[in-house]
Image: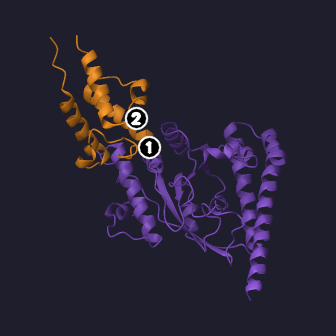
Chain colours: A orange, B purple
Amino acid sequence: MGLPVPTREEIFERLKKLLVEEFDLRDEQVVPAAQLAADLDLDSVDWIDMAVALEVDTGLELLEEDLSAIRTIRDVVDVLHGKLTAAQP
Amino acid sequence: MRQKLAIAKSWRALRTGIAFSVFGVGALMLVTLAFPVVRLLSGTGEVRQQRVQWLVHRTFQFFAWFMTVLGLIRVARVGMERLRQSAPCLIVANHPTLIDVVLLIAELPQADCVVKKGLWHNRFLRGVVAAAGYIPNDDGAALVGDCAQRLRAGRRLLLFPEGTRSPRGRLGHFRRGAARIALESGCDVVPVVITCDPPTLAKGGKWYHVPDRPAHVTLEVQEPITMRRYLEPGTSPALAARRLTEDLRILYETKLGQCRPQTSAALTAAASP
């Protein structure tokens, strides 16, 4: 039996920690509705760095189609939660 | 008196139009006459590109002189010896006027330039930018990789962090591409601070909106900034790029008299040999 899938709240907290530590964002900036580009000023290269960091942290592979649908923090959490759920045996 | 000023301004507008025409014709002549000869005589793509860049450099030297003779600009150059170093480096500059890129390339016999993608659709300049191997500023990750590779190969790169001309009277937003490129290549950043007074050929202005007097353009080359302080172990590339970009912005704001209270100890330390 595999490890339980983290909840969306747990995924959000891990994502927030990553963004604050690695992208110099403030805690209060990282909210579910925050848009990655418009609100958090993450450019195309930042997205790649974020994806790599998330892959290292979660063990998941993030494909281009996963990233193309993402606009907000909530979208990132949903994608990660969906992939972690699908990865369960 | 008012009539005299109006006549003087019209005369300056005419000279500006002449300068634009000479620039356009010059670009077409380069593409149709000079570049085919270079293609014939040059071997590999890189050799051909560097010869084309040298031709562009010499052409822009002439054009800078021509604009001075026409009484449109006066140019002051400070710290140019910092551009004569042989080591590869990333040259960054603010972009207050259309002519600053001409004046900069006139100082650089070889420089790869990151330019607006739209120039590839400009009938006068598309041949020049393509033959010179300039880089369109449209693809983030690929752009960073390509530019860093060119720097590691020993070339020099010119880039405007604002990505476009500055808004009137202030700096535009600094994109992090310059910082990313410098950090990935490990090469020094050489900032050039440019002023243009009165504002001429600025963003949003028409070419015929000429000032009442020649524009005084100053190019001031700053001390190179080394990357070692930004590449400390444990610092993520994203964080390092943000810090370097912020430090560059503070440098420009300070030099342009748009000071902010905080200073950057890291920038001061990074500029030390």
* Chain identifier of the residue bearing label 2 in the image: A
Q: Nearer the viewer, residue B135 or B56?
A: B135
The mark found on residue A22 in the picture is none
Residue that numbered label 1 is attached to: B184
Q: Nearer the viewer, residue A88 or B58?
A: A88
Residue that numbered label 2 is attached to: A48
Residue A77 in the image, given as x and y percentages of width and height: 28, 30
Residue B93 in the image, given as x and y percentages of width and height: 53, 60
* Chain identifier of the residue bearing label 1 in the image: B
Query: Is residue A89 depicted above or below B216 in this figure?
Result: above
Q: How many marks?
A: 2
Query: Is residue A9 depicted above or below B76 in this figure?
Result: above
Amino acid type at circle 1 is: Glu
Q: Dot 1, crowdedness within 10 Å: few (<14), some or many (≥20)? A: many
The answer to whether one can see residue B82 in this image is yes
Q: Is residue B193 left or right of residue A1?
A: right
Say what secondary structure mark 2 lies in: helix
The answer to whether one can see residue B273 in this image is no
Q: Which residue shows up at 33% across the image and 31% down it?
A: A75
